[in-house]
Image (tube, grey):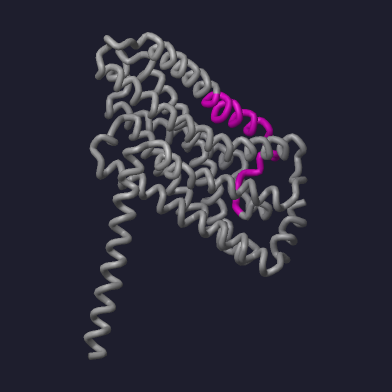
Amino acid sequence: MTSKLSLELATREEVLVWTETVLFAFTNVVAVFGNLLTFYAVYRNHRLRTVTNMFVIALAISDILMCTCCMPFTVVALFHGQWIFGKSYCLFQGFAALTLAMVSIVTMGVIAVNRFFCVVKPEKYLFVFKKQRALIYIVIVWCLAFAGSVLPFSFEGKNSFKFQPGKAMCSYTFERNMAYTFTIACLYIAAPLKIIVVCYIKVFRSVSRLNRVFCPGVNPSQLRANVEEAKVTKTLVVVLFGFACCWLPIFVMDILDAVRGELAIPRQVYLTNGFLIYLSSTINPVIYGIMNRQFRREYKALLCKITCFRRQNSNNNGSHNAENDA
């Protein structure tokens, strides 16, 4: 099946080559720019420099690394119809993609725990989620991800990651080692998802209960704090939902391939799989802009600056050309 997928990739019509290449390249550019906007928003707005947003920035870092370390290779592979970077870069892309995927889902789990303590156990929140400890949690997440993605090298060496023409990227072939596949599925997918579901259920139950308790005589600052935390939580739930929409089809497809022991899905479906991997690194800034007023304000401020700067340069160039003509 791999040879068939390779042939289909290499013999596409020119229109399809350009369509796929431009689509992935455009997604790459939007992902990089969008995640840089997230950095800019937190840098400019001191109110956004919260412990929760430290994990949001950690997510943005993993997304930018996915955009710069993985996506460009796929764009070039789609353009050429084959992998042209050699085995070492293939190992690098596959390892990076697996590591960053694990970082993302485990970070989502930590964010869910953060929301749980912030809303359900506020008396313990400042102790459990000090900024210094948040940095330690982020480092632990990355160490866990590295530990999971480096394992294939111990039992398969340089054959750990191979180019998959259907996805137009290098990745681990999960059907080759079911024990490893089962371990990854349990520790890096099932466990974080269970934590996420349990935490958010308790968070929304707590928010609902607090809203029923509030009355006209309640402290207004306490009410505002509750409303603000509820808004932050809703934004992060939408981020989680977007992540799930991108990654659940990928997980299901990889598990099906692992169980069957072969790649038996059409190339277009595999390519959609690869596109969803990169799309997951693109959507978060869009969600922040839609759901969070402070992020949206900072995004608009930067975009306005860029527009004004371009107009000023255009006007200056026009004046300079007019002077030369005169």
The total number of labels drawn is: 0
- Quadrant assignment for the C terminus: bottom left
Residue 149 percent across, percent down from the top left: 53, 39
For residue 50, above or below residue 78: above
Residue 116 percent across, percent down from the top left: 41, 19
**Magenta stretch encompasses residue 301:** no
Left or right of residue 247, residue 311 in this image: left
Q: Quadrant of residue 84?
A: bottom right
Q: In front here: 148 or 243?
A: 243
Main SS class of the magenta portion in the image? helix
**Magenta stretch encompasses residue 190:** yes
Residue 24 percent across, percent down from the top left: 56, 57
For residue 30, above or below residue 147: below
Left or right of residue 171, residue 122 in this image: left
Which residue appears at 59% of the width and 31% of the height? 184
Which residue appears at 42% of the width and 22% of the height? 113
Residue 262 percent across, percent down from the top left: 76, 43
Taking the view exactly as shown, the residue that stands out farthest to the bottom is 326
Which residue appears at 36% of the width and 13% of the height? 121
Left or right of residue 41, residue 177 in this image: right
Which residue appears at 72% of the width and 40% of the height? 257
Region of the chain picked out in magenta, as a range: 169-193
